[in-house]
Amino acid sequence: MTRDLHTALEERLFRAVNVDLGPAADALALVLSSRWTGIAVGLCLVAAFLLLGRRRRELGGALRLVAAIALAVGLSDWLGYEVLKPLIGRMRPCYALQDIRWIAGGRDVGSLPSLHAANLTAMAVVALAAHRGLGIGALVLAAGVAWSRIYVGVHWPTDVLAGAAWGAACAVAAIAITGRAAQMWAARRRRGRGSPVRGDPSP
């Protein structure tokens, strides 16, 4: 069960974005809002990480980034859908308002946070850790996806802002977890070869 939790100010902001900009804008918004766009972006980033790792001769680092992006999106999407959306239970604008443009599918489930915005931002933050240019490009795309979710009528502006913040937090956590796991793995390998590790008093 969802509840209408929007404010008058947010309705004005929503309506300012949810306007008819023509068939080209509609088509662009629908493409950006598609789940397949997120999947394609994720696959492209994984390929880019592996190419960067090969070029830098750092395959281990590339694999760590691949693990980080998978973990970041997994945390963002699963916890967002299973915990945050039901907990908050905010009604989508397409169900709360009359006379709006609603041109994409949106079930009557919690709208906060926007997981499209969250997942794309999570991928972008991991990409930023790998390569500045790649990360900035991914952030621009994530912003486009966030715009599209308001434009097609299924999210409030604060939904996408909260989604971006949630995705960024999941990415930071994933980078930290995978970085720590890589350090522990490297230390175990050094111990297995009999090499001294940091903090080991043996010669």
Image (cartoon, rainbow, N blue to C red):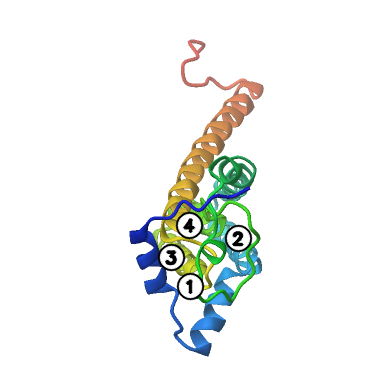
Q: Which residue is mark 4?
A: 124
Residue 27 horizontal/vertical position (percent): 56, 83
Q: Which residue is mark 2?
A: 42
Q: Which residue is mark 3?
A: 143
Q: CA distance from mark 2 to mark 3?
A: 15 Å
Q: Which residue is mark 1?
A: 151
Rendered view: 165 above or below 83 = below
Residue 116 location, quadrant: bottom right
Q: CA distance from mark 2 to mark 4?
A: 9 Å
Which is more foreground, mark 2 or mark 1?
A: 1
Q: CA distance from mark 3 to mark 4?
A: 10 Å
Amino acid type of the residue that numbered disc 3 sits on in the rendered structure:
Ala
Q: Measuring 55% from the left and 66% from the top, which residue is drawn there?
A: 94
**As rendered, which of 167 and 16 lies closer to the eye?**
16
The extreme left residue here reads: 9
First in sequence: mark 2 vs mark 1 = 2
Q: Measuring 61% from the left and 62% from the top, which residue is drawn there?
A: 47
Which is more foreground, mark 1 or mark 4?
A: 1
First in sequence: mark 2 vs mark 3 = 2
Callout 1–callout 4 Cβ contact below 8 Å:
no
First in sequence: mark 1 vs mark 4 = 4
Question: Residue 118: which disc?
Answer: none
Amino acid type of the residue that numbered disc 2 sits on in the rendered structure:
Gly
First in sequence: mark 1 vs mark 3 = 3
Q: Measuring 59% from the left and 50% from the top, which residue is drawn there?
A: 2
Residue 35 in view here: yes
Rendered view: 81 above or below 40 = above
- Crowd class of label 3 (few under 14; some 14 to 19; many from 20; radius 10 Å): some
